[in-house]
Image (cartoon, helix red, strand yellow):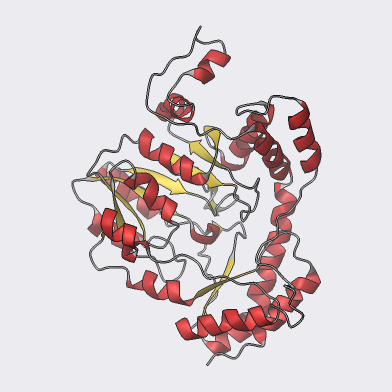
Amino acid sequence: MHATGVTVVPFNRTHISDNELDYLAEAVRGRATCGDGPFTRRAAALLREITGARQALLTTSCTHALEMSAILLDLRPGDEVIMPSFTFMSTANAFALRGAVPVFVDCRPDTLNLDERLVEAAITGRTRAIVVVHYAGVACAMDAIGDLARRYGLAVVEDNAHGLGGRYGDRPLGSFGCLATQSFHETKNVQCGEAGALLVNDPALVERAEVVREKGTDRSRFFRGQVDKYRWIDIGSSYLPSDVLAAQLTAQLESFDRIQERRHAVWTAYHDRLADWAAAGGVAQPAVPDGCAHPAHLYYLLLPDLDNRQAFIGHLAQRGVQAAFHYQPLHASPAGLRYGRTAPGGCPVTEQVADRLVRLPLFADLDEAGLTHVIDTVRSYEVS
């Protein structure tokens, strides 16, 4: 907190986009606020345009989109799914719920993404899929991972919660896996409080994905007039968000380019104006490999050690700047030890990164005064 007891710059502040309140009112006045309404369809169309996905299905969360992925891959107890240890617990939980075993692989020290060089050693006769997480929206090494998946006959799922608007080469993130998931939690670049989406790139999964999302029924086909009644035909659950949430998301997606422009300005200011301070103090800044375009989802610093990380967060807080650390290693968590296993060699990079990382405030409405205050406050910290 600032000396006055007031936070000067919060870690996140949700952006209210053009038409957002009007669309919310329109959805409520339309008196059809359940899922799969007109705003749901509009938001899905915008997502397909941004990502190039064959189908985009809005869900109640990215977690639920991941759970749908596990169902669509027909995972069974004992099947193994390779994923990074440095990720949110939903990435693992979705597959553990089906009885599959998360196999935790270490991250790269530069991008903090799944280390593609360690994946092959983690593959066994039980491996069914590789889940990649594009940390901070910086793409994983999709060429190498795709080659491995094809060689071993494995599915690739993209947890693209950070990556909407990012690219690998000339392709948008979310277009590489047979399935990909998005998050529209309030901390994401575009948001509606709580929601997500499943992107379906494999045409063989499109129809079943609709069924799984609709409680295992062919209700969507019924409302399109393709069947005369809808029935329970598969397993599934209630993954549809309200059209009220979709109305808010539609407005956000329509403002995507303007939101991104401002977020990139903040990210670039941090990167450029903190470079000399970081170099002098042995603090690592984000790495973006050639051929990757990131969406300015978050900006992090890697302090030299845990003591500096904690002191740095305290230093910022005392001066009114909210900063946050991030993921704790899943391979060493109580549930990770119970439901998963760690790939050969362990996850030493994940363990040290988790102790060193700090995320700075980054949101579209961060004005120049707030941005300068954050930068000046960061630069006033002396690494010990």
Residue nearest the viewer, comparing 92 with 204:
92
Q: Is residue 57 above or below residue 147?
A: above
Does residue 352 appear anywhere in the picture?
Answer: yes
Q: Is residue 179 left or right of residue 35?
A: left
Q: Is residue 377 left or right of residue 127?
A: right
| Residue 174 in picture, x, y percent from top left | 51, 45
Q: Which residue is located at x 61 percent, y 54 percent?
A: 188
Q: Residue furthest front?
A: 5
Does residue 305 appear anywhere in the picture?
Answer: no
Q: Quadrant of residue 129?
A: top left
Residue nearest the viewer, comparing 358 with 50:
358
Residue nearest the viewer, comparing 298 with 286:
298
Q: Quadrant of residue 300?
A: bottom right
Q: Is residue 319 above or below residue 85?
A: below
Q: Is residue 214 above or below residue 76?
A: above
Residue nearest the viewer, comparing 156 with 162:
162
Q: Is residue 381 left or right of residue 197?
A: right
Q: Residue furthest left?
A: 125
| Residue 112 in picture, x, y percent from top left | 44, 66
Point out the image quarter for the N terminus.
Answer: bottom right
Q: Which residue is located at x 63 percent, y 73 percent?
A: 271
Q: Is residue 234 left or right of residue 120?
A: right
| Residue 232 in picture, x, y percent from top left | 41, 18
Q: Quadrant of residue 318?
A: bottom right
| Residue 146 in picture, x, y percent from top left | 37, 48
